[in-house]
Amino acid sequence: MLFSTIVATSRAVGTTRSRRTKVEELRSLLAVLEPVEVEPAVSWLAGEPRQGRIGVGWRTLAGARVDPADAPSLTVSDVDRAFTELAGLAGTGSTGRRRELLATLLGAATTAEQEFLVRLLTGDLRQGALEGVMTDAVAATAGLPAETVRRAFMLSGQLSVTAAAALTGGADALTAFRLEVGRPIRPMLASPAPSLADAYSRFGGDVSVEYKLDGARIQVHRHDETVRVFTRTLREITGSVPELVDLVAALPCTSVVLDGETLALDPAGRPRPFQETMSRFGAESAHDLLLHPYFFDCLHLDGVDLLDAPLAERLDALQRVAPEHRIPGVLQPDDAAAKAQFEAALAAGHEGVVVKDLTAPYAAGRRGRAWQKVKPEHTLDLVVLGAEWGYGRRTGYLSNLHLGARDPDGGEPIMVGKTFKGLTDALLQWQTEEFPRHERSRDAHAVYLRPELVVEIELDGVQVSPRYPGGVALRFARVVRYRPDKTAAEADTIDAVRALLPATDSG
């Protein structure tokens, strides 16, 4: 298949707001791909090469730009082979060879293909939110239930691999995916709840009410003596957290997969700022700052997979293997006990609670309704779309943020407001230095960014507004912190923003 067909499909998907149209565009493409073309094509449409990072950035691309070709000639296999060779370059002479390969590739590309390649290689095309639409398209093409494809994706962690299996091997190939100790799976996520009473009543009181920590999500795998630790984005950090490795290696089991949070504590046992916990995740080796794990789920124990078991059964397994490291929680509390747990979490310096349905299985990779997070203040994780240059005391700094919610159907983030409140001098300095690294364009008033940075915003609520394309606007929004542990694909959706509308506004 010609590479230009992929480019045309990406453009068609990106220019429509209709989920049905997006799925149909993708299905039409998937139906005519050769088996060897499925993995690269699906990866590109999700916004990244299947080879991962291949050592190409803006500076390298700028040095390799050439005039575009007059007509399409590149095939999917041509581009995939070039990416594979680029990813394998290292050592003496690799810089020159990389520039040469890129010039050859770009020289064979039309103007539209060059634009797509540059955006793909610099991360500007990253569309992780398209995963849901692509999953539906794979299911439609293969003639399979969408839930079957979603489950295989949950277990494989790679949409391109899942798509290839579905389209070449059907249901049998997908059912071959199993929870594999040592290979991370996509984490289950919680949805915001309007109130504790709402979350509690949703499940009729058959719930676990657990502390919501201001920490970093971890997934820990142990097989015999080998322990591996992953972040919420499935990045391995084993070498940076030896204290967690030692702790899990000492648990009374031979194999286990645990889900939880980790955070740094001060001498009084209260949580340190989130940024201090995250500083360990980017480290090459251990620091003096120790991390403490708090596990809230057990997905596998001694040869038994527990993904499909109800939460109550998974918590029993967690109690058997790591009772001293469980997150504080109460089971089947009455109204008073649930409220007391919420107040205790806040008093201990944590964010709030998560109310979980004790009958629900583990739905990895989905922000469903079985887990409901409750905080005293409304907060949303939003995408930074741009920032305006400040004035007065903030002259020379990028200040007023443009904020977007994720489009659940894979489109560009949808703008829902602006704010400059909550920005400290240190954050203003950081933004002004960091934002140009994510720059998409600029004018005299603002710098506009690729959708890569996620910021946590506190707000008093939302209101109906024709000013923004999503039809809603944030009320009294202020910056809490940036979220380096989250990608734009994990930001809150426009649906989550609309869910905060007062009942009279939301209809």
Image (cartoon, helix red, strand yellow):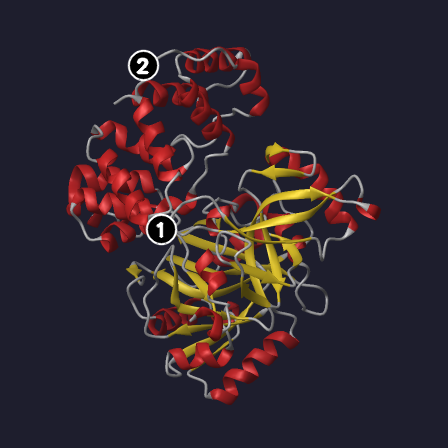
Q: Give the camera-side residue of 417 and 342.
A: 417
Classify 51 as above or below 482. above
Mark 2, Cα crowd under 10 Å, few <14 / some 14-19 / many 20+, is some
Closer to the observer: label 1 or label 2? Answer: 2
Identified at 20% across, 46% down, the residue is: 140
Residue 342: quarter of image: bottom right
Rendering coords of residue 212 (x, y %): 54, 68
| Tag 1 residue | 181
Of label 1 and label 2, which has the lower sequence position?
Answer: 2
Classify 375 as above or below 398. below
Rendering coords of residue 79 (x, y %): 36, 21
- Which of the labelled discs sits on residue 73, or is there none? 2
Kindly identify the amino acid type of the residue bearing the numbered disc 1: Val
Determine whether, in the image, residue 260 is placed left or right of residue 266. Answer: left
Q: Is the C terminus in the top left, top right, bottom left or bottom right quadrant?
A: bottom left
Determine whether, in the image, residue 428 is placed left or right of residue 457. Answer: right
Secondary structure, mark 2, is: loop
Q: Give the camera-side residue of 164 and 28.
A: 28
Rendering coords of residue 407 (x, y %): 43, 50
Secondary structure, mark 1, is: loop
**Residue 249 appears in the picture as rendered:** no
Mark 1, Cα crowd under 10 Å, few <14 / some 14-19 / many 20+, is many
**Residue 459 appears in the picture as rendered:** yes
Identified at 58% across, 67% down, the residue is: 461
Identified at 66% across, 65% down, the residue is: 271
